[in-house]
Image (spheres, coloured by chain):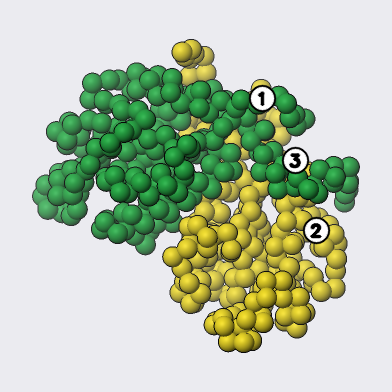
Chain colours: A green, B yellow
Amino acid sequence: MEVRHRTRKLYTDFNAYIRRNRKRFLIKQDPKVIWLTGLSGAGKTTIAEALEKEILRKGYFTKSFDGDIMREGINKDLGYSLEDRKENIRRTAEIAKIFMEYGSIVICSFITPTEEIRKIARNIIGRNNFIEIYVNAPLEVCEKRDPKGLYKKARNGLLKDFTGLDSEFEPPVQPDIELRTDLWPVKKCVKYMMIYILPQIKFRKKGWFRIK
Amino acid sequence: MEVRHRTRKLYTDFNAYIRRNRKRFLIKQDPKVIWLTGLSGAGKTTIAEALEKEILRKGYFTKSFDGDIMREGINKDLGYSLEDRKENIRRTAEIAKIFMEYGSIVICSFITPTEEIRKIARNIIGRNNFIEIYVNAPLEVCEKRDPKGLYKKARNGLLKDFTGLDSEFEPPVQPDIELRTDLWPVKKCVKYMMIYILPQIKFRKKGWFRIK
């Protein structure tokens, strides 16, 4: 097996720095966590998917997380009590942070119903890297859409602690972006978000460090 | 803002497929999870760091996890009881899996003391993607090295359930690689591992799908 030591000098003092940043230079982006909050049925997943496509099309790397996927794997031991919701968000935020530090733009779609819970995520990820998007549609609209039939179940008493009905949703106090998904088509929402997001994820030191 | 729709056709039917695989094509590697198991002081972290350097030098993407880092963030709610150790490994394996599916070669350094616990990780990640490396040094050697002073603490009764002393370490039954870190220098260990690992992480369909 071929073992070359040409570049070994690189890995003495600056080892950790280079290793961490090499990924960023390769990917050429400033990693952020984009956090979508809103009621069930407000359109978080739809918006997230459309946004991810658009960001990928621009040549950036993304990673998406949403509640259902997380609850199938790492968070399958958690329920829907307030404590469990907090733990769900805490773990998700920690994982999102690992991905962000890895160089990826992370898109998280979670109801994150209260300011307290959103604060957990924001504090773990860090205010400067956290883009909070309020996916806003009135409860009546969400209930009418009811893509997963959850509102119906909750109305029939089959689901407890359902956000919007018997569990409160606090609208975000100061989201970076608010989308009215009942008034705007998805395209317009994506366009609106990209105007804000694109300058933030653009890598500013393009080209000064080149990996062949 | 400029919005082009040239590549939109790409994202209709094969959307999910392309999105998932685009990362692999860009990265050009077959993602695996390399799991280092062994006693505290056996050299897992040293080996993992040297291995990561070597894999990075070959032009691949890696992500490392080790027990101490995980316990500072996502697993800070866990202790060292058997149940908590299992949960620690379960979560780690789920995160390693997410990273692997993202296209990354993942290196995990965890004591993972019993076959049962290693099985948890192996089952989550999948046998075919799991490379088990037994970092083996006799207990006396590990205790003599004692890089973090943990053996001393444990001998003085300050640490409970310490693997190797009052908590058992079961040697892996059939590791993919066994390293004798008491006999071999780090360089030799890395060389030995790379012979096995390199053919497995090489991307085989190089070039048939090109991203500019």
Give the answer, above or below, for where B80 lies relative to B51.
below
Can you tell which of label 3 and label 1 is closer to the viewer?
1
Marks 3 and 1 share the same chain: no
| Residue type at the position of mark 1 | Lys
Q: How many circles with numbers are drawn on the protein?
A: 3
Would you name the residue on which mark 1 appears? A206
In percent of width and height, residue A195 lies at 43, 20
Q: Residue at x 80, y 58 (%)?
A: B190
Q: Secondary structure at mark 3?
A: loop
| Residue type at the position of mark 3 | Gly
The label on residue B190 is 2
In percent of width and height, residue B101 lies at 55, 46
Q: Residue at x 24, y 37 (%)?
A: A171
Mark 1 belongs to chain: A
Q: Quadrant of the C terminus of chain A?
A: top right
Instruction: Tell me the quarter of the picture where residue A108 sits.
Output: top left
| Observer-nearest of B32 and A60 | A60
Say left or right for A201 vs B211.
Answer: left
Q: Quick one: label 1, few (<14), some, or many (20+) residues within 10 Å?
A: few
In percent of width and height, residue B11 lies at 47, 25
Give the answer, above or below, for where B29 lies relative to B87.
above
Q: Distance of mark 3 from mark 1, alpha carbons? A: 20 Å
| Observer-nearest of B1 and B209 | B1
Marks 2 and 3 share the same chain: yes
Say left or right for A158 vs A85.
Answer: left
Say left or right for B34 vs A46.
Answer: right
